[in-house]
Image (cartoon, grey):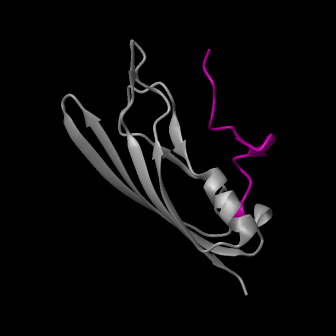
Amino acid sequence: MTRNVSTLLSVNFMRIPTTTRISELWPSVAKIEIETHQTYRSAFGVYERDMPGRYDPDSPAEFLFDRINTDRTVGHFDLFSSVAGMALMRETHKSGTMECRGNEAPDHDHHCPCTLDYSIGIEYIG
C-alpha cells in the first residue's frame, strides 16, 4: 500500500489540504524562517545537509523536509505541528531535534539513524 503524504497533512485529528496558505491558518504571521541541519550516519560514512527555508503568508502551510537517506521506509521530516503550535501561542523561536521513525531500508529492520536539527523563527504582524 502506498500513502500519498503530499496531498493531506494530519494534525490533531484535523486534515489540512497542502494548498492551504499560511495566511489562511494564521493571519497574524508575517514570515516564517526555518533552518535545518540533517545528519545521516551510515556504514558508508556520515552525510550532512543544511536546508534553510523562508515562508511568506502566501506560501503553502507545508513544512516537509526530505531525508538524505533515500532508501528509508518513512517519507519526510514534518515540522507542521511545531510551526502550528508556535503560531497558536505566538511564540517567536523554537529549536529541537527530530529522529527518523522508519527503518534504514525496506529490506531490513535496522532503525534509520537520520536526524534533523531545526530552528524555527516566526515574525508576526503588529
Q: Is residue 85 above or below residue 48?
A: below
Horizontally, residue 33 falls left or right of residue 105, namely: right
Q: Is residue 78 magenta?
A: no
Residue reaching furthest to the bottom: 126
Identify the residue at horizontal 76%, vertical 46% (top origin).
16
Q: Is residue 4 magenta?
A: yes
Q: Position of residue 15 (x, y in %)?
A: 78, 41
Q: Quadrant of residue 56?
A: bottom right
Q: Quadrant of residue 88?
A: bottom right
Q: Quadrant of residue 37?
A: bottom left
Q: Which residues are magenta?
A: 1-22
Identify the residue at horizontal 25%, vertical 43% (top origin).
47
Q: Position of residue 91 (x, y in %)?
A: 65, 72
Q: Position of residue 62 (x, y in %)?
A: 62, 52
Q: Is residue 102 above or below residue 9?
A: above
Quadrant of the image for the C terminus? bottom right
Identify the residue at horizontal 78%, vertical 71% (top origin).
27
Q: Is residue 27 above or below residue 70?
A: below
Q: In this figure, what is the number of numbered marks?
A: 0
